[in-house]
Amino acid sequence: MQSPSSILKLIMIRLFIILTVFIVACSDAKTEKRSSDRDKIDSDCDKVVQLIAQGDSQKAMQHLKSISVMSPSDLDSLAITINSQMASLLPSYGRLTGYEFVKEFSAKDILVRRNYLLKFERYYLRCSFTIYKTVGGWKVTNFDYDDSLIEVLY
């Protein structure tokens, strides 16, 4: 028969193991939720660029409205601007051949800048999203495009 102190030690060890497993499981669940929120906004940004690359800037801006804090009327105007500019760029740049995610910059787990390249036959455009971790989850706070490569190369 075991002494009461050895039984108490055994119970304490088992309790310690159970608590350790519980704490580790809870911390993993938090991390998964955080990364799944982040994965979703990354996927949404991919979708916007994909739609632009397919020539559907109207749908791209509709999708951007659902993940952004930007004004819907600004995004409607942006869709018109993109359509107009793409029509004028195609003769010089050639047809759109695709897009590629290139680089990301982040400030802790709060603010992220995602950069993509829209690829044409003879040129490129950089598309960038600024995403911010709000109380309600990640949101796009800015979207822009140009041919500057500073953010992509450095």
Image (spheres, grey):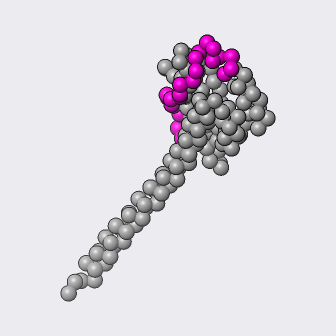
Q: Quadrant of residue 64?
A: top right
- At 69% from the left and 25% from the top, the residue drawn is 82
Residue 76: x percent and y percent?
Answer: 76, 33
In the depicted structure, whether residue 96 falls above or below residue 19: above
Asked if residue 95 lies in the magenta stretch, the reply is: yes
Horizontally, residue 67 falls left or right of residue 115, namely: right
Q: In which quarter of the image is residue 69?
A: top right
Q: What stretch is highlighted in magenta?
A: 86-110
Q: Position of residue 110 (x, y in %)?
A: 58, 40
> Which residue is the extreme one toward the left?
1
| 99 lies above or below 5 | above
Q: Which quadrant of the rendered structure holds the N terminus? A: bottom left
User: Is residue 84 shown to the viewer in this render?
Assistant: yes
Q: Is residue 5 visible?
A: no
Q: In this view, does 145 lie to the left or right of 22?
A: right
Q: Which of 33 and 17 is in front in this view?
A: 33
Residue positioned 52% across, 44% down in the render: 39
Q: Which residue lies furthest to the right in this view?
A: 73
Task: Please tell me whether residue 143 is drawn above or below residue 1 in the rendered image.
Answer: above
Left-right relation of 23 to 55: left
